[in-house]
């Protein structure tokens, strides 16, 4: 207990039971885990009211999501867009912004990639890929960057604007896919022109998952370094912690907000690029999958920490992948998985109130232990 | 305590399917096909809810008929989007449940999802509803569909008698060939009664958008349409809204007469129980299934709802006469001279496109008399 700083004493008025950084670690791992478990218990109660077995449910989730090579393939197919969608929430969150409209950036980024890719058949593949990636990143970045700009320039609430802009994005997407960018050959399901085979992202060697997953993981790690280990990231976190203080310190708050929301949107757009290039080969309304919304949940459970997003996205990819088996084997509607995710989300939000309270709890435990 | 939490049904089916899975995966590939000859696991995949009073319910009724067959296990999964999700669902049914015959029932499942998945599972049969199986597509895939345009033509005949305003209305999902054929058939059926009749069409943009469907129905009623039909996944909203506005309605997909007993005239229905039991019988007997299957009223693929109480005698008479004509086979709704609603000729005098004509499956126009645009 030699590490107790003067700050800790000043903040609480007494000596904490453990050094503050230890408590911080315990809280940031333990509380989300607690929320996850409590959410699962709440959902189990719900299942029992329906006369279904929670044990069977969780064993089916395990079976469908993680038990075999095929399960992993299924799970990982959900993970790639989830990583990007979660970053689109987590990065602005570190600046104190609650952006929930990542879906819009994903689908418009995907559309941009598809349109550019379809017209790049004659160029060498690396140029085609570069142009597709730039296009998807730019379009997604501008979309969410606009949300940031509206926030700092006009004081528009970013939560509301990003949510509403996602609806606008869907409308624009559908309109463009069904009119100017429509492949005349796509009769029963309107889609853009197919992108050439050389511009399709392939599967990883020996694994039936595409490059979007490892790239997504690398991007998460890069974002961690950007936010935690660079001066720009520090400036962003200061802005998130206390915007007044940041302004007083002379930090370029507007540029930080626009830049980081733009980055977040760009990454979501990149997620759209992978969906188009690896999976669909064109842009069609299958892109509007709601993954942007699951990304919100992933980011919250990961406490907006880029590295924590990776395992949490894997978990939720698995949960989503098990929807079909649960539906067929347990005779439950497909919305069951949504109910489960909803239960977890509610508990995650409730658990926010626990932060900073564990010190007294730990103290009590220590005292009880000493008394024995 | 633990046992009471598991309902007897789910536990039994869990054990049964796990057992089947172990048995099938343990066998070499050749034997798996032989195993399928006596017993069969059939998977149905729906794009919407099984009880949508529409497209998916029609298929689920077919699945229920298959469920009643000896030696068949039926798997069902609803609300599966037309995306990579359907690949996951199909592979999951094959890998976890040992499905050997799949019926993915939504249009958008075929290309590219079924076309890409089928070659990986040579001993599984992929029967797709609505798709266009072509020479060169996987040989273990196939497509089937019904000439339901004829049902909409018959709807139109009754509508033509019942409309007073000479305006009829159509709420449509997307301007794709199967939908356009229904709109055109509905109007042409009505024009067979009175060539003055026009049909206003409103596209909602997607298969299941209840709020837009209600708005579209109200807009049609506001513009004076007094008989309304639709082609959306779940016609419930259209039928109820139209009836509430005092319009007559013609149904689609399944019999919706219980939703509007007084205002329901007739409806174009799928007859999937007949089609599915047929396919499954063939699979059980080890007989080959054709890769490209189509059928109409004559073949028992589609049927008409019983005529409602408001249908006049004259309407009923012509309805029965036209139906008898269609039952003879070779009936053409699209026949010349006929122009589209932009003035282009779609059929010259003497030219006719019978229901079986494959050209109708790439229709891209609305005929003269339909008010609306395909884009």
Image (cartoon, coloured by chain):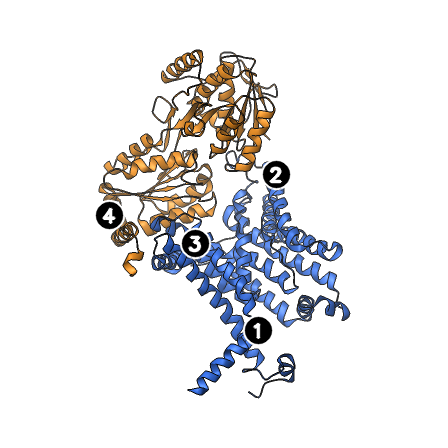
Chain colours: A blue, B orange
Q: Visible in this render: residue A255? A: yes
Q: Nearer the viewer, mark 3 or mark 1?
A: 1
Q: Write down the residue under mark 3.
A: A321
* Structural distance between the alpha carbons of marks 4 and 1: 63 Å
Image coordinates for residue B272, horizontal then vertical, percent: 35, 32
The chain to which mark 3 is attached is: A
Q: Residue drawn at (56%, 16%), measured in percent from left and top? A: B166
Q: Marks 2/4: CA distance? A: 50 Å
Q: Chain of mark 2?
A: A
Q: Residue at x 56, y 54 (%)?
A: A271
- Dot 4 and dot 1 within a common chain: no
Q: Earlier in the sequence, mark 1 or mark 2?
A: 2
Q: Position of residue A147 (x, y in %)?
A: 68, 53
In this view, the residue in front, B236 or A319, is: B236
Which is more N-terminal, label 1 or label 3? Answer: 3
The answer to whether A164 appears left or right of B324 in the picture is right
Estimate how packed mark 3 is, as few (under 14), some (14 to 19) or many (20 or more) residues with alpha carbons within 10 Å. Answer: many
Q: Are marks 2 and 4 on the same chain?
A: no
Q: Indicate the chain on which mark 1 is placed.
A: A
Identify the disc placed on residue A175.
2
Query: Going by the picture, which residue comes out furthest to the bottom?
Result: A2
The reply to whether residue A301 is in sight is: no
Q: Which residue is mark 1?
A: A356
| A357 lies above or below B163 | below
In the image, residue B107 sits, relative to residue B325, either above or below, namely: below
């Amino acid at each position: 207990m030699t590490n107790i700083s003067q700050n800790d004493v000043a903040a609480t008025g007494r000596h904490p039971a453990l050094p503050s950084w230890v408590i911080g670690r315990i809280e940031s791992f333990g509380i989300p885990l607690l929320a996850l478990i409590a959410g699962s218990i709440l959902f189990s109660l719900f299942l029992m009211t329906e006369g279904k077995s929670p044990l069977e449910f969780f064993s089916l989730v395990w079976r469908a999501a993680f038990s075999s090579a095929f399960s992993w393939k299924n799970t990982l197919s959900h993970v790639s867009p989830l990583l990007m969608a979660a970053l689109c929430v987590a990065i602005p969150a570190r600046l104190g912004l609650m952006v929930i409209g990542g879906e819009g950036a994903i689908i418009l980024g995907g559309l941009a990639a598809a349109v550019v890719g379809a017209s790049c058949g004659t160029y060498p593949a690396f140029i085609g890929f570069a142009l597709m990636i730039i296009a998807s990143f730019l379009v997604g970045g501008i979309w969410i960057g606009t949300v940031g700009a509206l926030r700092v320039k006009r004081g528009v609430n970013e939560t509301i604007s990003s949510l509403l802009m996602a609806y606008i994005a869907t409308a624009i997407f559908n309109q463009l896919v069904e009119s100017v960018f429509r492949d005349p050959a796509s009769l029963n399901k309107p889609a853009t022109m197919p992108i050439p085979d050389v511009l399709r992202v392939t599967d990883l060697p020996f694994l039936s998952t595409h490059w979007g997953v490892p790239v997504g993981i690398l991007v998460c790690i890069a974002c961690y370094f950007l936010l935690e280990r660079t001066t720009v990231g520090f400036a962003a976190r200061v802005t998130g912690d206390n915007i007044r203080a940041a302004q007083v310190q002379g930090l370029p708050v507007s540029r930080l907000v626009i830049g980081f929301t733009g980055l977040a949107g760009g990454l979501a757009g990149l997620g759209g690029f992978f969906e188009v290039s690896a999976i669909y080969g064109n842009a069609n309304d299958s892109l509007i999958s709601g993954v942007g919304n699951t990304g919100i949940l992933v980011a919250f459970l990961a406490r907006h920490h880029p590295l924590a997003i990776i395992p949490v996205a894997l978990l939720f990819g698995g949960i989503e992948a098990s929807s079909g088996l649960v539906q067929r084997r347990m005779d439950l509607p497909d919305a069951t998985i949504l109910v489960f995710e909803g239960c977890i989300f509610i508990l995650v939000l409730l658990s926010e109130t626990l932060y900073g309270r564990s010190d007294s709890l730990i103290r009590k435990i220590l005292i009880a232990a000493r008394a024995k | 305590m633990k046992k009471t939490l598991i309902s007897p049904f789910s536990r039994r089916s869990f054990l049964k399917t796990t057992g089947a899975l172990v048995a099938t995966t343990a066998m070499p590939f050749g034997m798996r096909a032989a195993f399928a000859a006596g017993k069969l696991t059939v998977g149905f995949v729906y794009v919407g809810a099984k009880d949508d009073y529409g497209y998916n319910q029609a298929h689920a009724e077919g699945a229920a008929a298959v469920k009643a067959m000896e030696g068949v296990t039926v798997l069902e999964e609803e609300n599966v989007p037309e995306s990579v999700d359907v690949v996951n669902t199909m592979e999951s049914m094959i890998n976890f449940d040992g499905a050997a015959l799949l019926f993915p029932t939504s249009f958008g499942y075929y290309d590219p999802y079924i076309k890409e998945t089928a070659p990986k599972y040579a001993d599984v049969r992929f029967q797709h509803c609505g798709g266009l199986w072509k020479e060169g597509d996987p040989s273990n895939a196939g497509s089937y569909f019904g000439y339901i345009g004829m049902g909409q033509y018959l709807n139109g005949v009754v509508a033509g008698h019942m409309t007073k305003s000479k305006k009829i209305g159509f709420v449509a999902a997307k301007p794709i060939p199967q939908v356009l054929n229904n709109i055109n058939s509905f109007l042409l059926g009505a024009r067979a009664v009175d060539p003055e009749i026009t049909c206003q069409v409103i596209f909602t943009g997607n298969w299941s958008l209840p709020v837009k469907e209600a708005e579209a129905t109200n807009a049609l009623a506001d513009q004076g349409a007094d008989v309304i039909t639709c082609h959306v996944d779940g016609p419930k909203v259209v039928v109820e809204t139209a009836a509430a506005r005092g319009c007559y309605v013609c149904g689609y997909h399944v019999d919706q007469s219980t939703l509007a007993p007084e205002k329901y005239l007739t409806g174009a229905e799928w007859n999937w129980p007949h089609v599915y039991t047929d396919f499954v019988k063939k699979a059980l007997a080890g007989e080959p299934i054709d890769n490209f299957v189509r059928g109409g009223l004559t073949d028992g693929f589609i049927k008409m709802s019983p005529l409602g109480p408001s249908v006049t005698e004259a309407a009923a008479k012509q309805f029965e006469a036209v139906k008898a004509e269609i039952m003879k086979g070779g009936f053409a709704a699209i026949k010349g001279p006929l122009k589209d609603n932009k003035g282009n000729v779609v059929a010259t005098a003497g030219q006719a496109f019978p229901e079986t004509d494959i050209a109708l499956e790439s229709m891209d126009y609305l005929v003269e008399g339909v008010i609306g645009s395909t884009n």
